[in-house]
Amino acid sequence: MNGTGTLRELFQRARRHDRGITYAARSGESDWTSYAELGNRMDLLAERLKQEQLRPNFIGAVWMAPTPECLAVIGAVILAGGIPLPIHSYMPEQDMLRLIRKFEPEAVFVSEEKLPILAEWNIQGEELPFYLYGGMASGPIAGISAAPRPVRRYTPPEAVRMIFLSSGSTGEPKGIMLSDHNMLSNVDAILDYTTLCDEDIVLLSKSLGYCSTIVGEWFAAMASGANLVLSGGFVHPFEMIQCVRTNKVTFLCTVPSAILPLIHSAKWAAEDLLTLRQLLIVGGPMPDVMLLRLADRLPHVRLTPSYGLTEASPRVSYLPYTQLRTKPQSAGIPINGVELAIVQDGREAATGQSGEVVVRGPNVMIGYYDDPDRTREILGPLGLHTRDTGYLDEDGYLHLTGRTDNALLVGGHTIYPEAVESVLLSFPGVPDAAVSAVEDLQWGHRLIAVVVSDVSTEPVKSPELHAWCVKRLSPALRPREFRFVTALPRTASGKLDRKALKSMVKEEEHVHRA
Amino acid sequence: MSIEHEELFFKVRETIAVVAKRLTSEVELDHTLVDDLGIDSIQILELLSALEDTFGFELDVDDIRPESFRSVQAVLHFVERKVAS
């Protein structure tokens, strides 16, 4: 494919009758759709969308449960000339409203179970300026009045084919605009290092709101002719084992937190995952001791830690299986067509020297949606600044060491403490709050909220704060512990002292554990 | 309810309460974990390992069924079954 062509062409071409998607719901229900049938569904909806005479390059926000219907809708938006904006199915409703205001989608697609939420918005007088679709069903939806907006504030560049969301330090998600070439060049490079083929069965279990799921699993499977198994996600890794066993999965891409509990359990054996041939680990580093322990227990599986970010469509590097035992702590070498550099003080650093990881290649995004300032900040003359720090060793292997900003990793999600803090500060009776983290073997980081309690009023309690967060934050963003203090550490200029906060939280952690 | 059963029920409620950051008295038999107690996917995993520690069993691959962790009642049945075996 050579990264050329378009997604539209991929959807037209990948229509085999003998390959397709098995939908394996958590309830145990299972259903098969061939790629040909999925293509027909895309065509039908795309035709209807064209009849609505939506603006060329309209934005279609897709807030749906992870089902084949959701994939068909994303495909239909592309075939109709639109730009899909996939949204995590678990996105809290207030965040969804904010997204609608920011991205002004001309069309919004929601699963049936979400319709009451929109009806409620209607009752509250919220304007719904878009065509609303209950999944693939078009036409007016009873009880909800929605009408499209005639103009939009910002028009994405012509080449934008999809927009993905990524968390931002202000608490507001960033819209990452990717072109056909961005995504298809990444698909090519992924197929190259994974050697996915039409004998494979790919398990897709991460949220469909992630670029990594859409490009690295769905598009990669379609492009290689591999079958897909779509699951509604797993709570426990044993469910993943059951799914692999039942559906004879050969290829799986997951985050460290989803497999780490397996390493601690003696209750499964390699035979349970006999069909699996390749396991990609994305979304954060896996401790090298754990990686090797897993490799020992799964000698027939090629474990492949991979590194990337949505701004790079998303894959950047991978650790070849042959180097797993010699460099288990490394994020590997760049994928085909991509170049890596380490930049320190505006210059490329020498081998072994630390700095910011910078990426160059056809996978680097067009820019952030309606945010030229931030786009300029991150897309410099040297390439895409990842905000990850690290170094390249003498063999050219990347080693990640930290971040240039405050971002934390929780179960594969990049979390900015600022986003959590704004929700805590909106709780009545919380005068000040900050979020830090301690290292966590399973999740990467465990978020800890440090809350100032106002002595003049009724003290705020953990359960109330937790309940507040449950309504407003997705699970990975919720603090797992609340600690109460009289004041937060601040610098001489009054800024929150995150370093002092971190050591405070860490010290107390020792006391708690002791 | 026999004494053992009552004790087991209390311990299950207590374990769920700790994970859900609630008082034991706030956890009722007919409560659902997600909707009534606000337990999220990360806490379900915490709950499973807390149950293993408290009751001294180890989960098997086929133990994990979504319906086993829908309500306090379901968790109680699950623990009873594991303890008995």
Image (spheres, grey):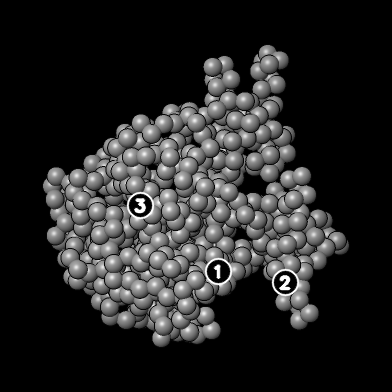
Is residue A429 shown left or right of residue A241?
A: right
Residue drawn where x is 57% and y is 35% of the image: B48
State which chain disc 2 sits on.
A
Quadrant in which the C terminus of chain A is drawn:
top right
Q: Which residue is mark 1?
A: A403
> Disc 2 or disc 1, which is closer to the eye?
1
Q: Earlier in the sequence, mark 3 or mark 2?
A: 3
Against A391, residue B14 (above or below) is: above
Quadrant in which the N terminus of chain A is drawn:
bottom left
> Disc 3 or disc 2, which is closer to the eye?
3
Tell me how far mark 3 sits from mark 2, CA to CA: 42 Å
Q: Earlier in the sequence, mark 1 or mark 3?
A: 3
The local secondary structure at tag 3 comes to: helix
Q: Which residue is mark 2?
A: A497
Looking at the rendered structure, the kind of residue marked 3 is Tyr
Looking at the rendered structure, the kind of residue marked 1 is Arg
Which residue is the extreme one toward the right?
A: A456
Can residue A349 be seen here?
yes
State which chain disc 3 sits on.
A
The local secondary structure at tag 2 comes to: loop
Q: Which residue is mark 3?
A: A321
The numbered mark at residue A455 is none
Tell me how far mark 1 sits from mark 3, CA to CA: 26 Å
Pick the front one: A318 or A65: A318
